[in-house]
Each structure stands twice: as C-alpha cells, then as structure tokens.
Amino acid sequence: ELYLFLLNNPDVTVEIGGHTNNAMWPDSAFANQLSTNRAKAVAHWLVTKGIDSNRVQFKGYGWTKPIEPNITEEGRRKNQRVEITILNMNG
C-alpha cells in the first residue's frame, strides 16, 4: 500500500520510523541499531522498487516511543513496529 501511495503521489516524502521494545532489547544501543535497520530495510525496499531515495527517510527510535506497555507479550509485539510519517505533500 505504501509503495502504491508513493508511486501515485510523486510529491510526497515520508519518514520510515523503526521501533523495538525494551523487554527483549534492554541495551539501548542495540535497540537503536535494530530499529534503524528495521526502518532502513523498508526504505531500501521502496527505493529498489523505483521510489526516489530523496523521498524516503528512515530513522530508528529504539524503544523510546512505545505505543503499549512492555509488560505483556502483546504489548511488546505491538512495540516492535515500523511507522510511516508523511513529511511533505508538496514536493
């Protein structure tokens, strides 16, 4: 869906944000690297499909932005994610 959205909206730039949880990855440096790699993989896939790399940024947030408490398996699973943020819709 993201690929088609970007393909059909050539003036849009996005940030791919990678996230982890702090229960499985208590070392913040490792969590940051893992989340960066997660976001980078998505960005790389989009670029290999033909989306201009200038339109796709990526950033790892580690476990600094949880959407659920990390005390349950479900919460930890939800915190291991990639989020897409539209940065610019005007080119």
Image: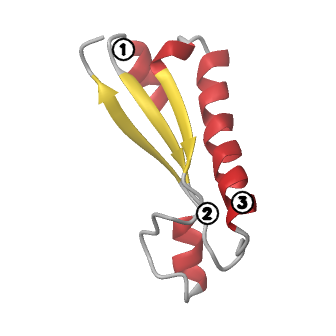
Q: What is the CA distance from the residue labelled 3 to the residue labelled 1?
A: 37 Å
Colour option used = secondary structure
Q: Which mark is residue 29?
A: 3
Mark 2 residue crowding within 10 angstroms, few (<14) / some (14–19) / many (20+): many
Instruction: Tell me the tag on residue 60.
Output: none
Kind of residue at disc 3: Ala
**SS type, badge 2:** loop
Name the N-terminal-most of marks 3 and 1. Answer: 1
Tell whether 55 sits left or right of 60: left
The location of residue 26, given as percent across then percent down, is 70, 75
Q: Which residue lies under the disc numbered 2?
A: 20
Q: State whether residue 91 appears in this view.
A: yes
Instruction: Using residue 12 as the reference point, say whether residue 61 is left or right of it.
Output: right
User: Which residue occupies 60% across, 59% down?
Assistant: 62
Taking 80 as reference, is 51 above or below it? above
Based on the displayed image, in which of its 4 quarters is residue 72 positioned?
A: bottom right
Disc 3 crowd rating (10 Å Cα; few below 14, some 14-19, many 20+) is: few
Return the residue at label 1. 8
Amino acid marked by disc 2: Thr
- The part of the image, by quadrant, that contains residue 32 is bottom right
- Which of discs 3 and 2 lies nearer the camera? The answer is 3
Q: Are marks 1 and 2 in contact (CB under 8 Å)?
A: no
Instruction: Name the residue type under label 1.
Output: Asn
Q: Earlier in the sequence, mark 3 or mark 2?
A: 2
**Residue 12 locus on image (x, y percent):** 34, 19
